Image (spheres, coloured by chain):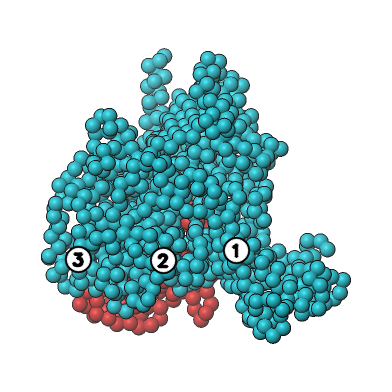
Chain colours: A red, B cyan
């Protein structure tokens, strides 16, 4: 067991974890952050995407011990003071989710994409979301949501 | 009064944002895998690596003595309490159906089948210990290739279940001459051979994997008087029924809950070995038990879809008028006959004739057992296969005659003035307007311009050629009239149930037997009830997916929720209104005949007097002053059995660019005009179409479940099974025409599967069209660059040889 201490969605947490524990399992099982989900076992789907020190990562691809000392944000910590993040709002407005299983990862990845490129073209959005699979929406409204959020953030 | 005055803001047709979204975009979700209960145990499955093998022995001792392991079981440890996986639709009386134990004790029939389970305090401990279970197998010859398996009786090839002595499960035949719905197809073909056109083709429907994003998960809590199962399923009611029927627990002691479910597409329309094993474990151990599959397990053990060989013969007169269609199918069931199983290709039997006036039709489907993952419904279920077959054939007929593919379709389709129309397959299409949808699609697509560009590129010898693909499809939705299901020997009915409860504080609780998993029922059904009862959209709460709340239901599949479930809602609402009207008359001291109901108010005709439905609900709750013989309740139920299917249709046009030097394909434009009848929520409809299109396009271009010679699924992870990403797809151009269905009050037809059904042939037709001038008349799906390139090379070789 290894002791790790980190900030998750603004709260400091500290636990003993087995060295092989994946960050996503630590979030879900130890912390109860079940908003973040698992969709695959090959790091292909992006359903588990969270932010670690401001960068998006696939949390199934990071060991909990690697996140020691880091600041993590999950979908559950994205809204602030009861205000939805513009990307969350845009997903709702543009009907960019159906079953919603890919949605936490898709939103976290979109936030990261816009942080890097506040004014992406359709092409850049599509490539920026390539690591996140959605089986329901056909992506069209997700792309539209990212565009809409970009506009809102810029203005 | 005009309709506009009556309903100032109609909810039906409005692009309401979804009620479901709030929790899903903030992570406040209830996926089955999120559930933890006190003392809960975790399960890992030990699965067979072999496609077909005898289980000689299983040594569980090392696993059982591992830290934190509670128990290890094999099939031999359970008797009948394990129950069985059922086939609800034996398609013929003599169907050969292998017994399907959730965990067989003696023999495995596909790679991925469960042979042992480890139960432990944590999922990690269970998985670690599962590695230590030592299974001794004796490999048996495996039936893998569909065509070879179909002829194994004659050739002496491997038999998937040796005790059955054959791989042939059932032969299902429909013949229009025998049924009295049309002429003799052999006659039509013979006549066309002498003096007409005969097109013969063989198409392959590759095997696909539904690949819903949420892996399947199940939790069973055996504490308490009722046993509760949470499952990531589309069909909580059917699961409950099947558990009772096969495990001996009374149905009244079973509660099944489908909480938030992350997509299904038919893939969660199943009664699974995993559910049955976890059910048995929880009962045996007396503790809550959870199992969540890994993605690799999901791909190998969740049922697959499609997988057919289609031999098609179409006869026509020289002017392109079709005279007959003969369909001979081989359908791969995999190792077992799944819950709908052989019924999936049979659904296609009614759709091969599509929108065309075939005078003669013959359909024969042989279902075949193999040692591969079992197959069952996948989005469209039987109808995409049929639509692909006929729409490819209509393009081939057009090419043979040298006419535009839309021209040959128009010559043969049912004219809008010909409805209702009884088809050669015996269905009555109530409404449709193929001319209108096609005209709009052509205009939006820029059909003439793209044809002109195609000509230019051909003439200039551009290495990148343009192809235009057409698909004018229809489908049957709203499964299903119970009598029709009965005539097809399906094991259940096709009705749906709804309850409307008027709460004392003014809100309305709506309960539906449909079970949503991404479709947006909470929003769309709220719109329907809000309009019907004249209450605010926000005041309606839709509940579903729990057999203790939605006590009756037949769940969600086959685009039935709106068409069948929505009609049940309308009828339950109307019963509420009828009861409230009596109360209104009583309280307003008027005759019932003088009460008019509109926009949520009961008014006395010709007076200014009236009461809102909410006021009446409060008065009924108090029950101080009701008509004499009236129960103090407005709450109403309705169970609706549809009288017919509904028949959405549409015209899809696709432009593909094909690099003739590399075989690479690129989608240039996709336009679809769908007629799904009355639209309740255009946003949700567009979302269904987008998602459906991408699944159909993915079949055309990318997806295929591939087995190696040993029967191992080589596309067994998301690295190898190619789901499309945002970067692979384009924005689609959507349009609608509205020809309401005449068989339900709202005029809805269903939209869940349209995109998937229509798009696959549109894309393949476009790919073939791009290279037809090079001698290519088919490309096997998925149309990968390699396949396209090979088709071009093969055509060049044939042309060269014949020159
Ligand atoms: S669960 Fe992390 S990428 Fe799929
Ligand atoms: S909304 Fe269902 S997977 Fe994306």
Q: Which residue is mark 1?
A: B638
In the picture, measured across the screen, residue B268 lies left or right of residue A42, that is right
Picture coordinates of residue B587, whole percent (x, y):
77, 80
Whole-angstrom CA distance, mark 3 to mark 1, is 47 Å
Q: Which residue is pictured at 64% across the width and 62% down the height?
A: B571
Q: Earlier in the sequence, mark 1 or mark 2?
A: 2
| Disc 2 versus disc 3: nearer the observer | 2
Q: Are marks 1 and 2 in contact (CB under 8 Å)?
A: no
Q: Which quadrant of the rendered structure holds the N terminus of chain B?
A: bottom right
Crowding around mark 2 (Cα neighbors within 10 Å: few <14, some 14 to 19, many 20+) is some
Whole-angstrom CA distance, mark 1 to mark 2, is 22 Å
Crowding around mark 1 (Cα neighbors within 10 Å: few <14, some 14 to 19, many 20+) is many
In the picture, measured across the screen, residue B336 lies left or right of residue B91, that is left
| Disc 1 versus disc 2: nearer the observer | 2
Whole-angstrom CA distance, mark 2 to mark 3, is 28 Å
> In which quarter of the view is residue A47 placed?
bottom left
Q: Which residue is mark 2?
A: B251
Crowding around mark 3 (Cα neighbors within 10 Å: few <14, some 14 to 19, many 20+) is many
- Tell me, yes or no, if residue B103 can be seen here: yes
Residue B80, relative to residue B796: is it above or below? below
| Disc 3 versus disc 1: nearer the observer | 1
Q: Which mark is residue B72?
A: 3
- Tell me, yes or no, if residue B232 can be seen here: no
Q: Tag 1, which secondary structure? A: strand
């Amino acid at each position: 067991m290894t002791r790790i201490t980190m900030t998750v969605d603004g709260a400091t947490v500290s636990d003993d974890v087995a060295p092989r524990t994946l960050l996503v399992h630590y979030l879900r099982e130890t912390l109860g952050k079940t908003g973040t989900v698992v969709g695959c076992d090959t790091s292909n789907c992006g359903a588990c995407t969270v932010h670690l020190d401001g960068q998006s990562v696939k949390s199934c691809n990071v060991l909990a011990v690697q996140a020691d000392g880091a600041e993590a944000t999950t979908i559950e910590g994205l809204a602030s003071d009861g205000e939805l993040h513009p990307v969350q709002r845009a997903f709702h407005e543009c009907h960019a989710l159906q079953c919603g299983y890919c949605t936490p990862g898709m939103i976290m990845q979109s936030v990261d994409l816009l942080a890097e490129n506040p004014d992406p073209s359709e092409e850049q959005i599509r490539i920026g979301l390539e690591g996140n699979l959605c089986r329901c929406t056909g992506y069209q409204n997700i792309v539209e949501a990212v565009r809409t959020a970009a506009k809102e953030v810029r203005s | 009064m005009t309709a506009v005055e009556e309903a100032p803001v109609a909810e039906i047709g409005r692009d309401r944002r979804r009620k479901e979204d709030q929790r899903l975009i903030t992570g406040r979700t209830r996926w089955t895998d999120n559930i933890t209960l006190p003392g809960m145990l975790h399960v890992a499955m030990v699965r067979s690596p072999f496609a077909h093998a005898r289980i000689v022995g299983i040594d569980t001792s090392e696993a059982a003595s591992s830290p934190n392991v509670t128990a290890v079981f094999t099939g031999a440890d359970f008797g009948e309490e394990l129950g069985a996986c059922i086939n609800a639709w034996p398609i013929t009386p003599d169907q050969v159906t292998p017994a399907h134990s959730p965990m067989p004790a003696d023999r495995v029939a596909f790679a991925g089948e469960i042979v042992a389970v480890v139960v432990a305090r944590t999922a990690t401990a269970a998985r670690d210990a599962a590695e230590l279970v030592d299974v001794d197998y004796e490999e048996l010859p495996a039936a893998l290739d569909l065509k070879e398996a179909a002829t194994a009786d004659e050739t002496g090839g491997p038999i998937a279940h040796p005790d059955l002595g054959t791989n042939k499960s059932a032969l299902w035949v429909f013949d229009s001459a025998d049924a009295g719905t049309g002429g003799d197809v052999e006659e039509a073909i013979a006549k066309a051979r002498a003096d007409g056109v005969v097109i013969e083709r063989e198409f392959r429907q590759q095997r696909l994997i539904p690949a819903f994003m949420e892996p399947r998960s199940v939790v069973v809590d055996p504490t308490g008087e009722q046993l509760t199962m949470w499952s990531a399923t589309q069909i909580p009611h059917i699961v409950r029924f099947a558990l009772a029927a096969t495990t001996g627990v009374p149905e009244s002691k079973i509660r099944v809950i489908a909480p938030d479910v992350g997509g299904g597409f038919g893939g969660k329309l199943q009664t699974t070995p995993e559910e049955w094993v976890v059910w048995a474990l929880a009962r045996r151990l007396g503790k809550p038990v959870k199992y969540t599959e890994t993605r690799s397990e999901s791909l190998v053990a969740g049922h697959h879809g499609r997988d057919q060989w289609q031999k098609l013969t179409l006869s026509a007169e020289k002017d392109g008028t079709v005279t007959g269609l003969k369909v001979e199918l081989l359908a791969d069931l995999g190792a077992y006959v799944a819950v709908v199983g052989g019924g999936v290709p049979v659904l296609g039997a009614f759709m091969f004739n599509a929108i065309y006036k075939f005078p003669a039709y013959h359909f024969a489907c042989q279902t075949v057992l193999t040692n591969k993952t079992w197959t069952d419904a996948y989005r469209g279920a039987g109808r995409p296969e049929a639509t692909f077959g006929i729409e490819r054939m209509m393009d081939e007929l057009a090419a043979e005659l040298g006419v535009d593919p839309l021209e040959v379709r128009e010559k043969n389709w049912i004219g809008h003035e010909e409805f209702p129309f009884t088809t050669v397959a015996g269905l009555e299409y109530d409404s449709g307007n193929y001319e209108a949808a096609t005209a709009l699609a052509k205009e939006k697509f820029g059909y003439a311009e793209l044809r002109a560009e195609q000509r230019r590129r051909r003439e200039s010898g551009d290495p990148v050629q343009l192809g235009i693909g057409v698909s004018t499809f229809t489908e049957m939705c709203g499964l299903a009239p119970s009598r029709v299901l009965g005539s097809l020997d399906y094991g259940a009915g096709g009705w749906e149930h709804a309850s409307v409860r008027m709460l004392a504080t003014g809100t309305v609780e709506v309960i539906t037997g449909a079970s949503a998993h991404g479709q947006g029922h909470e929003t769309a059904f709220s719109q329907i009830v809000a309009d019907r009862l004249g209450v605010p959209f926000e005041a309606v709460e839709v509940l579903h997916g729990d057999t203790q709340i939605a006590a009756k239901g037949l769940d969600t599949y086959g685009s039935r929720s709106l068409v069948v479930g929505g009609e049940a809602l309308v009828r339950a609402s109307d019963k509420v209104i009828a009861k409230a009207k009596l109360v209104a008359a009583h309280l307003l001291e008027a005759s019932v005949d003088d009460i008019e109901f509109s926009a949520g108010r009961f008014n006395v005709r010709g007076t200014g007097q009236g009461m809102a439905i909410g006021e009446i609900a409060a008065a009924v709750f108090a029950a101080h002053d009701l008509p004499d013989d009236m129960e103090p309740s407005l709450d109403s139920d309705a169970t609706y059995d549809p009288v017919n299917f509904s028949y959405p249709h549409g015209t899809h046009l696709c432009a593909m660019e094909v690099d003739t030097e590399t075989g690479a394909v690129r989608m240039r434009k996709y336009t679809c005009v769908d007629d799904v009848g009355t639209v309740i929520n255009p946003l949700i409809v567009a979302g269904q179409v987008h998602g459906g299109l991408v699944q159909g396009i993915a079949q055309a271009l990318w997806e295929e479940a591939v087995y190696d010679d040993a029967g191992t699924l080589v596309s067994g992870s998301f690295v190898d099974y190619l789901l499309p990403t945002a970067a692979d797809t384009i924005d689609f151009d959507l349009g609608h025409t509205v020809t309401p269905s005449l068989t339900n009050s709202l005029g809805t037809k269903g939209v869940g599967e349209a995109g998937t059904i229509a798009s696959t042939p549109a894309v393949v037709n476009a790919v073939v069209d791009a290279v037809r001038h090079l001698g290519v008349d088919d490309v096997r799906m998925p149309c990968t660059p390699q396949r396209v390139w090979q088709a071009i090379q093969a055509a060049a070789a044939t042309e060269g040889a014949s020159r």
